[in-house]
Image: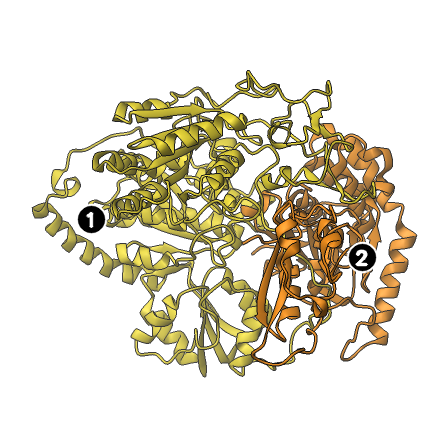
Chain colours: A orange, B yellow
Amino acid sequence: MSPRAGAAAGAPEASAVAGNLVVAGVGGQGVVLAGNLVAQVLLDAGCDVKKSEVHGMSQRGGTVVSHVRFGPEVHSVMVEPGSADWIVAFEWEEGLRCLPYLKPDGLALVSTERRIPPAAMLDHRAALDYPSSGDVPPGVLAVDTFAVAGDAAAVVPVIAQTTLIGALSVLLPFPGEAWEAAIGVWVPHKALAGNLTAFRRGRALAGEVRAAKASAAERAAATAGPADPAGAARTSEGAGPAPDGAAGQLVPLVRIERSWCKGCDICIAVCPERCLVLDKLDVAVFAHPERCTGCQLCAWLCPDLAIDVLRVPAGRGRANEENYARTTADPR
Amino acid sequence: MGETTTLTLLSGNEALALGAYHAAVEVATGYPGTPSTEVLEHLASISDPGEVDVDWATNEKVALDVGIGAALAGKRVLVTMKHVGVNVAMDSLMTSAFIGVKGGLVLMSADDPGMHSSQNEQDNRYLASFAGIPVFEPADSQEVYDFVRAAFEASERFDLPCLLRTTTRTSHARSKVEAGARTVPSGGPSFTRDPAKYVMLPAFARRRHLVHLERLERLEAFVEDHPLTVEEMRSSAVGVVTAGISYHHVREVLPEASILKLGVEFPLPAERIRRFAAKVDRLLVVEELEPYLEDGIRRLGIAVEGKRWFPRAGELSAAVVRKGLAEAGVLDAGDGPVERTSVPVVGSRPPVLCAGCPHTTPYLALGELDAIVTGDIGCYTLAAGPPITSMDTCLAMGSSIGMATGLAVSGLSSQPIVATIGDSTFFHGGIPALLDALHRGAKITVVILDNGTTAMTGGQPHPGIANDIRGRAARAVDIAQICRAAGVTSVTVVDPYDVAATRRALRAAVAYPGLSVVVTSRACVESPVKSRGPLYTVIADRCDGCQACMKIGCPAISWDLVAGTTPPRVTIDPAVCSGCTICAQLCPARAIVSVHDGTEPPEVERGATPAGTGAAR
């Protein structure tokens, strides 16, 4: 290993700079390129840099995560959970997925762009619920990258995410020219102008980014010790309702294949006991299991064969239904 | 090494290509497979055709055979493949240790701990030690660059192929590389007849086995003081024997430990390990996957701890090593960064077939036929997942056809039995199985998904393509002609963008009283050129939310929740749509029309290709 002095002029004490960055997004969003670009800035500044990601399956619309580590001497190529100074995420849900990497005082710059996987699309409700939390967790700065990029991303939408690289550049002690030079190295020529504009517009968010960083640091200082992140979203679905009914007894359970329901409301109209209702997406829901007699009229009359009436042991019925509701994205 | 000319950030695979190039490699071949693929591509991009003969081989065994032949002509040869590819090459590799090489031969085995994109996570140090060839394992890009040259030198010195083992994290991580310049190869090709060495008849092979065993003894002496094996003495409380990427994880979490880093892992440097063990109070082994070093060290009669503390499955990381060291009592349990305990739950995002992927319609049609579908290795393996879920098995390259034959000869007749295999996979390992099925009279249907490229690994040419890795013209082999020439009496070629024709062809094929082949022929939407035809859009008033189009699993199709209609209408993202027309053909409400002229896709002339692309053939 032979560290060599950097070539870049004006990089303030690059050898004293160290940090961990996680870049995340969906295949096709330019995560790998963004990681290369940041690594280039660091290399030019004379840092030791290591960068790691997994190619392969992730190219087909899956999650892509790139780790960039830098400092006077870097060993492991991967960022440990709890040790990322910064996260840059080009997709909202992928940003949330990476939060375990973030340091207590770290800052995640997360695009509000949302890409819903096709499998989740099979169910109206999953589409609506995805991402699972619209709340902004602590340590996250949500950036409407399309709004910030404006016309720079009009032709090539992925260029909008370059605004986040601009925002990140505020937090690192390298001059804007160093970043723009690296963009020149890595971005294809025809997309260069748009990327530079998007970068500058992101870098112009300096005030907002610094304020978010300061508040993340403040919050970390305030909750030093065992962290209980107020406002953090749920860690699991509800623990499940209390069992109802006597053991051993079978009760009817109306199972609705949500992805097949088109909301025609025939089942709601024909149910003698008024057990079913339409939810806000016009998908039938078994809202009143306690009234159901198991007559199966709904199942017989459903034009889309979306309804099954099962008999299940009392007490498990509602829990089962909830389980089905959770797993409808997976038809098998 | 010559004077330093460059300092750049290279991936391990780029460093391997550059290292081989600088070490005077003249022939390079392999079969694509993550995480090995970029080596040959990079080598082709940095070298002139006159300097290095680079091209893909039909499969890994062919690649190694080509490599051995070139090595016998005195050339330095690089052969690349992923870990499971070495299984395919194993037949040649085992005996290549007997016949030896003349020019140096380095076999790159890119292992994939954690199975980021593989069907298993075998540890190929065992395969190399089984074959009796040296294993070099670098830890970062600089080492990859340096180790290739050392491996070539060892290969020539001991007249043996050498295995260079990388893992996903060495192949795909970027780190600094100081590089020299190319050593100009000396001398043209020559071949010296030596049947006793090159013709492995039993009488000759017996003698060569003895030669090999004697050579292994010399190798054991050679590795004892090999400069790539480095001893770093720090605290004597804990000594760690490690190699490859694991070295950096150990340095990260245990900077005070003494380390014996093995650059060559087969054979093991017994005396060196003994001396190191004697200098430390407690000896640990940190290695990914199998307890290869640990077992070897224990066989030397040295007390050592390894897999007792560290996992045998999956890849290591600083965090995993830290946890193991805490369990071993070397570190305090509270050491290290604190992970957030409360984070939002997020949905999974599995990889999916691209918008416009021609593999979707054959699998949708097979789902309708209730066929038992044996699958194979490629993008189309994603058809096993939702929403298509039309694949029942996936084992190894080329296995689909043999497994379908097995299901057929076992007497299953209630459902059609269909093997599905990609074009590159068919060339790789499907052809012998097709001949076998034909010869046995197995009543199966073989669907060859011909998208004119090796798509999963990023679009490499194969024997069916009219160009080589450098884009120069090459002879293309026709899949349908191969099948007909072999004697398949029912061979249908269909355009998978024509949904109705694809359905008809598959229905007829499974009804055929004998072996039938359907070739679905349509260029991959991503490679070699990104295919974009006239885009399609949804007329919201006509859409009734029936989800017929959602069955494709197209990433361009989603619910239009903005409009606020219930049930929501479908919308097509113009930035993602490729204009393949599949959704428009499936839409019962005829709600999906061309953006261009508002028409539905033409019912005839579906063989036409989207603008700007060429069909597979």
Placement of the N terminus of chain A among the 4 image quadrants: bottom right
Residue found at the far top of this picture: B605
Residue found at the far left of this picture: B203
Chain to which the residue tagged by mark 1 belongs: B
Q: Which residue appears at 15% of the width and 33% of the height?
A: B193
Chain to which the residue tagged by mark 2 belongs: A
* Residue kind at label 2, given as amino acid type: Gly
For label 1, count other residues whose C-alpha is less than 10 Å away and answer few (under 14), some (14-19) or many (20+): many
**For the image shown, how many numbered marks are present on the structure?**
2
Q: CA distance from mark 2 to mark 1?
A: 64 Å
* Residue kind at label 1, given as amino acid type: Phe
Q: Which residue appears at 84% of the width and 74% of the height?
A: A221
| Residue B495: percent from left, percent from top | 49, 24
For label 2, count other residues whose C-alpha is less than 10 Å away and answer few (under 14), some (14-19) or many (20+): few
Placement of the C terminus of chain A among the 4 image quadrants: bottom right
| Residue B12: percent from left, percent from top | 52, 48
Q: Is residue B87 visible?
A: yes
Q: Is residue B503 above or below residue B144?
A: above
Q: In the drawing, does residue B347 fall left or right of residue B464?
A: right
Residue to which mark 2 is pinned: A134
**Mark 2, mark 1: which one is toward the viewer?**
2
Q: Which of the numbered marks, if any, corresponds to residue B98?
A: 1
Q: Are marks 2 and 1 on the same chain?
A: no
- Under circle 1, the secondary element is helix
- Under circle 2, the secondary element is loop
* Pointer 2 with pointer 1, Cβ within 8 A: no
Q: Is residue B565 above or below residue B44?
A: below
